[in-house]
Image (cartoon, rainbow, N blue to C red):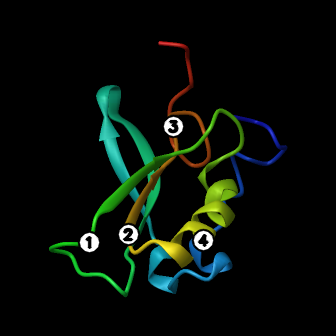
Amino acid sequence: PQFPPGSRRHVYRPSAFGFPKEADQEHEIVVEAEVRLKGFLIRDPRGDDQTTPTVIYFQGNAGNIGHRLPLLARLAEEVVCHYVLISYRGYGHSGGQPDEA
């Protein structure tokens, strides 16, 4: 969660990669033990909320969800989907500590 350095403090915002500014708002999901997982909801303006699929995207095991935004920006050019991006516990701005369990 600490690689690259600063990954717990700085999370790139979706608008930095061409997504609408309203996608920059962090959302949170409260899981057990009151741990708050942080993430972004990115709605594709070409779609609608009734029939457009939603991709739930979890990051890899280093960095934070902001590091994956260039990949999602490229995918969004080709595929009409809404995206929910979530950082694991202890990564990015999400609370808690990562563990193998």
The numbered dot on residue 73 is 4
| Mark with earlier residue (3, 1) | 1
Q: Amino acid at mark 3?
A: Tyr
Left or right? Give the position of 90 relative to 22. right
Distance (Cα) linking label 4 and label 1: 17 Å
For the residues carrying marks 3 and 1, which lies nearer the camera in this image? 1
For the residues carrying marks 3 and 4, which lies nearer the camera in this image? 4
The numbered dot on residue 52 is 1
| Mark with earlier residue (3, 2) | 2
The numbered dot on residue 81 is 2
Q: Secondary structure at mark 1?
A: loop
Q: Secondary structure at mark 4?
A: helix
Q: Nearer the viewer, residue 60 or 99?
A: 60
Q: Is there CB contact under 8 Å for labels 1 and 2? A: yes
Q: Residues within 10 Å of mark 2 (few under 14, many from 20)?
A: many
Q: Amino acid at mark 2?
A: Cys
